[in-house]
Amino acid sequence: MWDPGQYRRFGDERSRPFFDLVGRIGADQPNLVADLGCGPGELTATLAERWPRARVTGVDSSPAMIETARSEIAEGEAAGGERAGSERAEGETAMIETAWGERAEGKRAMIETAWGERSGGERARTETAGGETLGGETLRGGPGPGGRARGRLSFELGDVTEWAPEAPVDVLVANAVLQWLPRQLDVLARWAGLLADGGWLAVQAPGNFDQPGHVIMREIAASARWAPLLDGVVLNRQAADPGDYLDKLAAAGCRVDAWETTYLHVLPGGNPVLEWYKGTGLRPVIDALSPDLAEEFLAEYGARVRAAYPARPYGTVLPFRRVFVVARRP
């Protein structure tokens, strides 16, 4: 159902809530880190960068996403093996993409990571071209998940609601996946039960069910033209209220920090809101219809969201509310 390429079209905007979420985790040296609903794996790889001694596992129910994540690990390992201990060929330009989507060109660039202060108080820095230095440990390899965390980072296909780790988890991250799950509060409580003593659970989910992008989608899907063709198709669910998450996890004995944020994403392109939802909320519709019918649905949806989100001289503004919760088990 998932298209990794389409999902990545707004990678910077989609990654920002991830870093806002994970930046609130206070784990120092976890042994086992899990990313449930890992998608194509780039953000999972940054967890291996932040905790250079942890084993990091990404889990997703989409074969396409897991295939993409695994293939990029292999590419990263191959690239890292060629470059480890030596400089690139003379005249070649090193392009190192950071976790924030910015790039640095040329000779040995010092790129400040997205994670801010190290536990010792000094800034964590990544040295490119000859290897990467993170948290005092050198990890050989080039850009890409495999080059940054060879041997510590893995991905597996699985149902995140039933996933069982090999040992208690020190950090469990679930970014933009809870909204797809039925009985999400029960799932959240189950995830809390997977934590080691002192373990951290960090969850983020969209809460914009009342915004035009979703209202229009539901109205079209329920219309006489489309309802018979989409019978039984479950559209994207949404986050619960932050207070619901607080109550559930506090009842499980966790110390909880819950909040919400509305981002104002400024998107380029002729109809970027259509392209945004083609990568997420519209996936069940696209998967349920034939290609010709999917194009017809997208044309109708696209015309309405273009009117609901008019272009401005500097781009199209997409308000996007997200709900966050970070909990720690005693």
Image: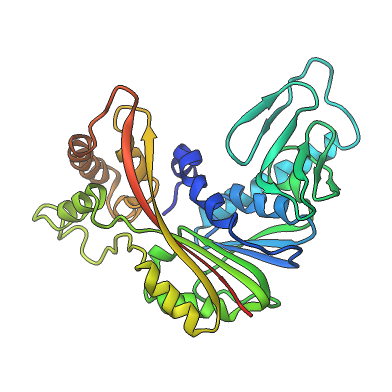
Q: Residue at position x 67%, y 65% from top?
A: 33
In the image, what residue occupies the spot 22% across and 51% down? 217
Q: In this view, does 87 lie to the left or right of 209?
A: right
Q: In x, y percent, where is residue 280?
A: 38, 50
Figure label count: 0
Residue 1 placed where, x, y %?
Answer: 41, 54
Q: Nearer the viewer, residue 59 or 74?
A: 59
Name the residue at 20% across, 64% down: 231
109 in relation to 276, above or below: above
Task: Quarter of the image for the C terminus: give it.
Answer: bottom right
Q: Quadrant of residue 196?
A: bottom right
128, above or below 49, in the image: above
**Which residue lies most toward the right here?**
85
Q: Hey, which quadrant is residue 124 in on the image?
A: top right
Looking at the image, the residue that sits furthest to the top is: 91
Q: Residue at x 47, y 45 (%)?
A: 14
Counting from the top left corner in percent of width and height, residue 202 is at 55, 64
Is residue 88 placed above or below 323 in the rendered structure?
above
- The correct choice, above or below, for 326 with respect to 219 in the image is below
